[in-house]
Image (cartoon, rainbow, N blue to C red):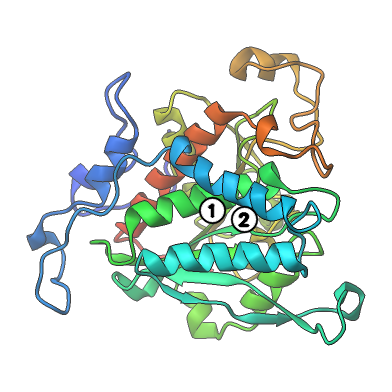
Amino acid sequence: MLRSSDGLGEQEHPRVLALELPEPGGPPARVVLELVQPSAADLPSHSDGSPPSRRAAGVSGAGATPHLEALQRIADENGGNRASPGPGYDASVQYAVDLLEAAGYDVSTPAYPLPKRLRRRSGESHCRNVLAQTRTGDPRRVVVVGAHLDSVRKGPGINDNGSGVSALLEIATRLGGSPPVRNAVRFAFWGSEEDDLEGSLHYVKTLSRSDRDDILVYINVDMIASSNAGYFVLGGEGKSRKKFGPPGSAQVACVLVEQLAATGVVARTVPLDRESDYAAFIDAGVPSGGVMTGDRGKKTGKQARRWGGQAGERFDPQYHTPRDRLDKLDHTALDRFTRALAGAVAHFAMSTGSRGPG
């Protein structure tokens, strides 16, 4: 595979290079385990003097499923959706916070202002994102992985985007809040993505220049279990910076493609389209990429031959409808993307390279 020269993929030790694929038929999760288990001599000791311990293994789509079930229950108990602002979204925030705090992360729920048109309850002026950062790794070198936590008001949003949220919760709880990593990892769960990306736009806009510069890469996860799934990696394609991404984005895409290849599927790279939460990071000059299984577009014959599924049909026939429920997911796609994302997170968490020139 093509490797960019931005330095993000360089490693001091070949044994932790994420682009080295396992033997055919080998479980990709093993790659993640190797990536996050350097010897004690490779990394500084923790403040209490104890050596790093094993933190991530066995990441899978099956591990994400209980979170999907919980999000479905939350929607069912709150008018059939998890839209922000709203009680379904508030319950989703609390669910994520409880899990991430129990896993040992430094968790915060920073508020962002709601435009008047989005205020649906008396006195409602703000909503919340959820951020969870490891307590280990260099806080001046941060890998950010994000998924929007809200749904549309028309449905429960289990693929869009309970699938992305559940994959990140599976990875985060397996990794734990104090893994032996070089760079800090920040999991972000955005509000109001379905309403002009309000949560992520405000978050990035209000970061200091120093805090923006501390972000090595941003990986966006939005819809990874469409019932007629495609395998798309966003970034590193297109003729403009806004479509290609800032310098370093090609390497993000390369790692995502390679990690999906380790699960047995050939992904297609596509331009960034500014329709999800990576938009603000691109504008801030952060190397960015993302993954998705497709929404309202139709699968071509060539894509059906490559990935299976039904040619001429939408990738997600349930997109933005009440039918976007747990029983409409492609669990094979969910598993592949969850494992690939775990490998990508581990790769960049161990990277010794710098961010591409902005």
User: Looking at the picture, does residue 112 appear above or below residue 222?
Assistant: below
Q: Which residue is mark 1?
A: 249
> Is residue 66 at least partly visible in the picture?
yes
Quadrant where the C terminus sits is: bottom right
The answer to whether mark 1 and mark 2 are in CB contact below 8 A is yes
> Is residue 17 at least partly visible in the picture?
no
Label 1 to label 2: alpha-carbon separation = 5 Å
Packing grade of label 1 (10 A; few <14, some 14-19, many >=20) is many
Q: Residue at x 35, y 50 (%)?
A: 347
Which quadrant of the structure image shows residue 31?
A: top left
Count of numbered badges drawn on the protein: 2
Asked which secondary structure carries label 2, the reply is loop
Front in this rendered view, residue 284 or 78? 78
Front in this rendered view, residue 269 or 48? 48
Packing grade of label 2 (10 A; few <14, some 14-19, many >=20) is many
Toward the right, the furthest residue is 117
Q: Return the mark for residue 13.
A: none
Front in this rendered view, residue 263 or 9? 263
Whole-percent x, y for residue 264 in the image: 44, 23
Q: Residue at x 77, y 61 (%)?
A: 83
Asked which secondary structure carries label 1, the reply is helix
Q: Amino acid at mark 2?
A: Gly
Q: Amino acid at mark 1?
A: Ser
User: Looking at the picture, does residue 318 appear above or below residue 84?
Assistant: above
Which quadrant of the structure image shows residue 340?
A: top left
Quadrant where the N terminus sits is: top left
Q: Residue at x 20, y 54 (%)?
A: 12
Whole-percent x, y for residue 115 in the image: 85, 79
Whole-percent x, y for residue 180 in the image: 23, 61
Whole-percent x, y for residue 176 in the image: 33, 60
User: Looking at the picture, does residue 161 appear above or below residue 149?
Assistant: above
Q: Which residue is mark 2?
A: 245
